[in-house]
Image: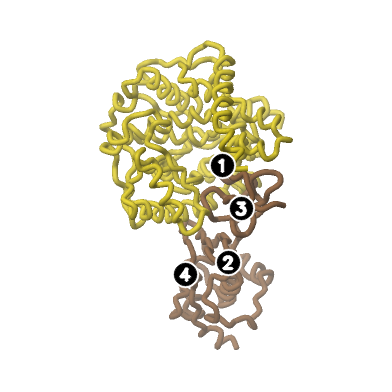
Amino acid sequence: MAEASIKSRGRLLASVLKGSWRRTPTPFKHPAVEIEEIAPLLLNSGAAALAWWQIRHSDSRDIPAARQLHQAYRLYTLQAAIHQQTIERVIALLRSFEIEPILIKGWAVARLYPEHGLRPYADIDLCVRPEQFAAAEIALKNLPDEQYEVDLHRGFAKFGGANFDEINARSESVRIGEVDVRVPCAEDHLRILCIHLLREGAWRPLWLCDIAAAVELRPANFDWDRCLTENHKRAKWIICAISLTQQLLGADVSSTPIAQRSTRLPSWLIPAIMKEWESEMPSMKLRHRAPMANYLRRPAGILSGLRHHWPNPIEATISLRAPFNELPRLPFQLGTCFARTAKLAARLPKLLREQ
Amino acid sequence: MKARVAQVLPLARREQLIIQELPDEVLVYDLERHKAHCLNETSALVWKHCDGKTTVAEMTRVLGMRLATPIDDDVVLLALNQLRRFHLLEEGSVTIGTMKVSRRDLVRKYLPAALALPVILSIAAPAAAQAVSRCGNAGDPCTPAGPPFVQGTCCNNSLVCGTTGRCQVT
């Protein structure tokens, strides 16, 4: 155990996941004690099946921690099949209201992996034309039950902008079971994945694996200019996210603009990610579980709520549309907090009426 | 009795099941009971041949050939007993309950042949293997992507996941 602790648990986790999105992962050399140490982190972050994919042919495959990872892989495999059926149902429903959504993340990126069960599935992320957003929300209330969460997005504004029609025109049609579903083209999707990772404070290693898979499996005619957009700052964010896949997960970024630019990441960035990956309860996860509005009902937990809602340096940077540079992040974190508080205050009358 | 059992025609249940075949096992999710199972290769082979037309005797022969080792009906019967217990056979298609098969005896008998006896495992989610849960209130869906629902995992300290896949107050 002591030996495993020499390397930080976050670094260890990154090392275990190196190349895990590939059909033939790199030979697995980690001793059992290291797997035992990071298994809870892998299970917690949704990267358990990818770790099993790495371990499955090694001598460590039969240790108790590896068996847990194997169970997660089985569970995700079944989830993938169920999730696929749900997507079919949701898409058919929206089409019956003449709404054509674009599927992003989740299944749309899982198809890049050797097996769909290598990543877990949360809600179904669908982007719709902004003017159809309200109609789509109403349509989804017609789902026979509410057990499937659909995360509906008003266009692509929060994933790096770009006009819905432009992304729609470039999107591709892929077959899911009995239906054809639109997914963004490889360039748009890579941009969406990168912005999403950073917006969420990069707390899940799985999302970095998604980006690594999207980079390595990009089509031969991948257009980097399209991916990096006309917005210089946003382009730097994307480059930063892709550089992380190389530095933390060993992704092959040769013959990409990242290889040519010799990107230097700000010194605070990787430590901020390691802090999230090493935490058994990352702040973002707690925040999703308990939005601040919930504390209007249970004010007793407000102090711990505030602590969980303290933005990590990465999300604070994105939230204030700031550059990733060596400047201290505290002002950005404070700024994000003020902006959020103002937003909550604006919603307060409505929330109180709903109590 | 043994001859009668050999002529039984088991029929696999196919409705309300999600089936995923992996290289050396088969995963099954029961949409009626919200339970997930993992069939090892031997169980999966028996289940695959439960078409209502293949007798136990024929299954034994096929299984012996596929596993490259001579086996008796008892291995197939053990598999059928388990499949029935996990509701993976059509009700009434097998009435072999009186035919007792001891796993311990079979382990002893087939150990020299290193035969993998039929096993069906229930798949329970390892702690925290679920994706991000968004639920914060009783009644919210507790497993983010719907089933497989996992009892005992949920949203916060005061809520647990109920059998319907919704959070309920502890």
Q: Residue, x 45% and y 56% (percent of image)?
A: A143
Q: CA distance from mark 2 to mark 4?
A: 22 Å
Q: Badge 4 local density, few (<14 within 10 Å), some, or many (20+)? A: few
Q: Amino acid at mark 3?
A: Gly
- Label 1 marks a residue whose chain is B
Residue A60 lies left or right of residue A298; in this view the side is left
Upstream in the sequence, badge 1 or badge 2? 2
Residue displayed at 61% across by 71% down:
B85
Farthest-out residue, top: A327
Choose mark 2 or mark 3, whichever is in front: 3
The subunit carrying tag 2 is: B
The residue singled out by tag 3 in the image is B139
Callout 2 and callout 4 share a chain: yes
Front label number (1 vs 2): 1
Q: Position of residue A193 (x, y in %)?
A: 42, 33
Q: Earlier in the sequence, mark 4 or mark 1?
A: 4
The residue beneath circle 4 is: B15
Mark 2 burial class by Cα count in 10 Å: few <14, some 14-19, many 20+: many
User: Which quadrant of the figure has residue B115?
Assistant: bottom right
- Chain that the image shows in yellow: A
Query: Circle 1 sits in a helix, a strand or a loop, which is it?
Result: loop
What residue is rendered at 53% in x and 20% in y?
A: A269
Q: Name the colouring of the figure.
A: by chain
Q: Position of residue B20 (x, y in %)?
A: 46, 58
Ranked by sequence position, the earlier of labels 2 and 3 is 2
Is label 1 on the same chain as label 2? yes
